[in-house]
């Protein structure tokens, strides 16, 4: 997992819970990286799971809720850092439909070794999107947060239902998104 994800997570922890909390979870985690991340480095995703679990234990907020909030935070940060991905895109559905064939293509150009999840979209009705998230990593709550962050970014009210189709070593979730009037 790219270091930018870790750096953004720790920034979120500092913003929401303070520098001391970020330092505490890094110290307690006893991570192979030592909790020092460069944005372009690659790190084991288990380190992020360890940090989130420790934060959950200290705050009483579920791991899933923390990861979802992190996903929402990431969407905002992606908009600030990579506005080109949002140019000419006018809705949440349009943006989410570009992740696999636009955003991830560019990420792979910059970081060929990146192991990205896949996103595939279908539109059974004009106001309904089925977005399938598939990954070797258990971060469907992060994808959910990105979806919610995208809806907020575009000022849209979208109901989201998660249909978990995961197997032993594969996370697969179909998100049903329905635009609300």
Image: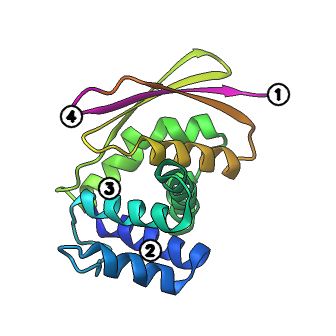
Could you tell which of marks 4 and 1 lies nearer the N-terminus? 4
Does the residue at mark 2 contact the one at mark 3 (Cβ under 8 Å)? Answer: no
In three-dimensional space, the C-alpha distance between marks 4 and 3, rounded to whole angstroms, equals: 24 Å
Residue at the far top in the pictured view: 124
Could you tell which of marks 2 and 1 lies nearer the N-terminus? 2
Identified at 40% across, 60% down, the residue is 53
Q: Position of residue 102 (x, y in %)?
A: 40, 45
Left or right for 4, reference 33: right
The kind of secondary structure element at disc 2 is helix
Could you tell which of marks 3 and 1 lies nearer the N-terminus? 3
Identified at 45% across, 68% down, the residue is 9
Q: Position of residue 39 (x, y in %)?
A: 32, 74
The secondary structure that most of the magenta stretch takes on is: strand
In this view, the mark in front (2 or 1)? 2
Q: Position of residue 117 (x, y in %)?
A: 32, 42
Could you tell which of marks 4 and 3 lies nearer the N-terminus? 3
The quadrant of the picture occupied by the N terminus is: bottom left
The quadrant of the picture occupied by the C terminus is: top right
Q: Is residue 171 magenta?
A: yes
Q: Nearer the viewer, residue 83 or 132?
A: 132
Q: Which residue is mark 1?
A: 181
Q: Which residue is mark 2?
A: 10
Q: Which residue is mark 3?
A: 107
Snapshot quadrant of residue 147: top right
Range of magenta residues: 167-181
Q: Nearer the viewer, residue 155 or 36?
A: 36
In three-dimensional space, the C-alpha distance between marks 4 and 1, rounded to whole angstroms, equals: 38 Å
The kind of secondary structure element at disc 3 is helix
């Amino acid at each position: 997992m790219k270091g930018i994800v870790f750096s953004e997570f720790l920034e979120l922890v500092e913003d929401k819970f303070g520098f001391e909390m970020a330092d505490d979870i890094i110290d307690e985690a006893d991570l192979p990286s030592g909790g020092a991340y460069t944005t372009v480095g690659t790190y084991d995703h288990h380190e992020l799971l360890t940090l989130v679990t420790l934060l959950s234990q200290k705050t009483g907020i579920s791991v899933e809720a923390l990861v979802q909030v992190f996903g929402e935070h990431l969407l905002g940060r992606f908009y600030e850092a990579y506005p080109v991905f949002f140019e000419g895109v006018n809705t949440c559905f349009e943006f989410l439909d570009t992740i696999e064939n636009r955003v991830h293509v560019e990420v792979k150009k910059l970081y060929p070794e990146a192991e990205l999840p896949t996103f595939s979209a279908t539109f059974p009705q004009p106001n309904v999107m089925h977005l399938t998230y598939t990954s070797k990593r258990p971060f469907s709550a992060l994808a959910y947060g990105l979806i919610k962050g995208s809806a907020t970014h575009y000022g849209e009210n979208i109901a989201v239902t998660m249909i978990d189709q995961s197997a032993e070593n594969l996370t697969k979730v179909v998100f049903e998104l329905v635009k609300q009037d």
